[in-house]
Amino acid sequence: MSMPLQERSEALSILDKEILNCATDECSVGLLVVKIQRMRDVNVDLGYEHGEYILVEAEGRMQQVLRPCDYIIRIATYEYALILPKIKHKQVIVLAAKKVLQQLQKVVLINNIEVLPSSRIGIAVSPFDGAVSTELMRAADVALIKSKSDGEIYTVYSEDISQSRLSYLALERDLRSAIKTSGLEAYFQPKVDLKTGVVCGAEILSRWFSENHGVVSPERFISIAEESGLIHDLTKWSIARSMRLHSQLGKIKDHFMLSINISPVLLSESDIVYQITSAVNLWGINPVNVIVEITEGAIMADPDKSLQTLVKLHEAGIQISIDDFGTGYSSLEYLKRLPVNELKIDKSFVMRMTEDEDDTKIVQSVIGLGHNFDLVVTAEGVESEETLEKLKDLGCDYAQGFYIAKPMAEEDFIAWMKASHWPPK
Ligand code: C2E
Ligand code: CA
Ligand code: CA
């Protein structure tokens, strides 16, 4: 059996040799690309040599379940190519992948600390998925990426996956250039004060009208931005664009709140605090006029990490809002500890309020809960006058929704405010 630290090119030449051998025997070569996950955490937490130890351990375990004629080749820092020659049935390759995963999912003991490395495998089979090594390797790589995006531990390559991967890559490439070349649009949706009947702020919502892909929904491009790391630049851009709007507001500035959505992936990075505070300083904006919206689900996914970032934002004078409230199973314990200023009731409850008594009760409870904790409460998704009136009766503080106005481009937003039924103070 061939052992580690051979290069990717060596794996390719072995693959080509075995593919050729199989052609005469009418059999297949299986290629498993194995990625050992969470190695960065292990290296950071336990030191680099322990990271290496886990890899050595992993190699030994893979060896135990493979045949003597199979190859284990380390092709990247945390990646292995397992080459399985002379296979008669495709199912055998999937079975081998499952056995390998079973081995890799066992605990590794390091200094008496139990470490549980998680692994994923992309699977490709010659000649179906590639007649030469480079094609087969690409297919297995694509399957591995798909595995990650679907949260599966292994994926067998198929032509469909390749198509969806290609369109994903095209979207990512165009999004990158849209962010660089001001190809995104900043839209603003007004927020009104239900007690005074005035516009008191706006939420910035990004729009992408792409030449190649048409209108791409924010859910789609935000998730691509999150996966590809583009979310940093996108957020920087949306912070700057909301500050720019603020700078044009003249005398209403002091009462005008800017709401900015912050992606969960940025919540665990202290950089976000610096980004917001430095933009606030640069544009000369009072930090209390800035609200950072973070979804309830994001906060609850890792409350302790979120707490650190939220405390820093709070200390910098920034307001904090829990978005999509009601969907993320908040514990009241955290609500008490987190430095939050606003609850934003998820639009799904607000939109159904006029038809569904239970949704009205949920909205009512959230308003009561928020007020008990001294928080302001905003309802999003207000689509009718009836809903708006009901919210006023329930004592809700602020509202947003299509009934008041849809999100608009900056100049439309400014024009709307001038002509609005909700004149700004
Ligand atoms: P969100 O933060 O919950 O934003 C509210 C969404 O509800 C927006 O969708 C808005 O257009 C929509 N909406 C507002 N009023 C109504 C209404 O009365 N009825 C209905 N049916 N919908 C209403 P949008 O703009 O498509 O954004 C979707 C999500 O994408 C946002 O949800 C937010 O999580 C995310 N997003 C958008 N722009 C950005 C951004 O620049 N950065 C980040 N991190 N996320 C963003
Ligand atoms: Ca929001
Ligand atoms: Ca929301």
Image: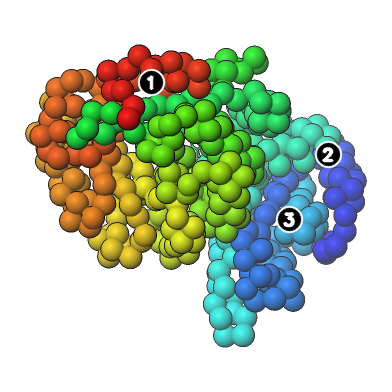
Quadrant for the C terminus in the image: top left
Task: Tell me which numbered mark, 1 or 3, is placed earlier along the sequence.
Answer: 3
Q: Amino acid at mark 3?
A: Glu
- Compared to residue 17, the image places residue 77 above or below, namely below
For the residues labelled 1 and 2, the Cα–Cα distance comes to 62 Å
| Residue 211 left/right relative to 382 | right
Q: Position of residue 399 (x, y in %)?
A: 27, 32
- Compared to residue 340, the image places residue 161 above or below, namely above
Q: Residue at x 30, y 42 (%)?
A: 344
Q: Position of residue 414 (x, y in %)?
A: 45, 20
**Label number found at residue 180:** none
Judging from the image, what secondary structure is the residue with disc 1 in?
helix
Judging from the image, what secondary structure is the residue with disc 3 in?
strand
Residue labelled with disc 3: 79
Q: Amino acid at mark 1?
A: Met
Q: Amino acid at mark 2?
A: Ser
**Label number found at residue 133:** 2
Q: Position of residue 253 (x, y in %)?
A: 44, 35
Residue labelled with disc 1: 417
Determine which quarter of the picture holds residue 387.
top left
Task: Tell me which numbered mark, 2 or 3, is placed earlier along the sequence.
Answer: 3
Q: Residue at x 70, y 49 (%)?
A: 32
